């Protein structure tokens, strides 16, 4: 059994993108995310940038 057996990861990903992208202009957010959401096929960076969010990874 894995965590994705219990939740719909695609819906949670979409919800996260929606919440971050809809923050009021000028709002700063610091969010700790697994590397898999910043890189690879499940990356949210491109989706956030396409909605006008400024994204920077701190490594």
Image: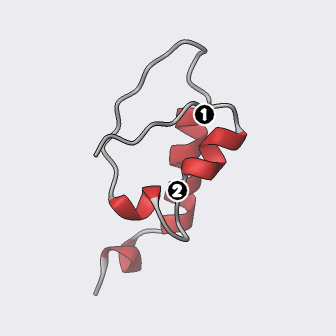
* Residue at position x 55%, y 49% in the image: 45
* Rendered location of residue 57, percent (x, y): 39, 42
**Quick one: label 1, few (<14), some, or many (20+) residues within 10 Å?**
some
Above or below, 23 against 35 in this view is above
Above or below, comparing residue 32 to residue 44 in the picture: above
Which residue lies most toward the top here?
26
Residue 13 lies, with reference to residue 51, above or below; the image says below
Question: What residue does disc 2 label?
Answer: 13
When asked about the image quadrant of residue 48, the answer is top right
Helix, strand or loop at label 2? It is helix
**Residue 41: assigned label:** none
SS of the residue at dot 1? helix
For image coordinates 56% across by 23% down, the residue present is 23
List the residue tagged with mark 1: 21
Quarter of the rendering containing residue 28: top left
Give the mark nearer the N terminus: 1 vs 2.
Answer: 2
Q: Residue at x 58, y 16 (%)?
A: 24
Q: Position of residue 26 (x, y in %)?
A: 54, 12
Q: Is residue 13 left or right of residue 52?
A: left
- Residue 10, percent from left and from top: 56, 65
Decide: marks 1, 2 in contact (CB < 8 A)?
no
Q: In this view of the protein, which residue sits in the foreground, 2 or 57?
A: 57
Q: How is the image coloured?
A: secondary structure
| Place of residue 49 in the rendered image (x, y in percent of width and height, measured from the top left) | 64, 40
- Residue lying at the far bottom in this picture: please name it: 1
Residue 55 left/right relative to 6: right
Residue 49 position (above or below residue 54)? below
Disc 2 packing (10 Å; few <14; some 14–19; many ≥20): some
Instruction: State the residue in front, 14 or 51.
Output: 51
| Cα–Cα gap, marks 1 and 2 | 12 Å
């Amino acid at each position: 059994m894995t965590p994705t057996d219990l939740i719909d990861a695609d819906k949670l990903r979409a919800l996260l993108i929606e919440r971050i992208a809809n923050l009021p202009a000028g709002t700063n957010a610091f969010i700790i995310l697994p590397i898999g959401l910043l890189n690879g096929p499940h990356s949210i960076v491109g989706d956030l940038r396409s909605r006008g969010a400024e994204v920077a990874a701190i490594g």
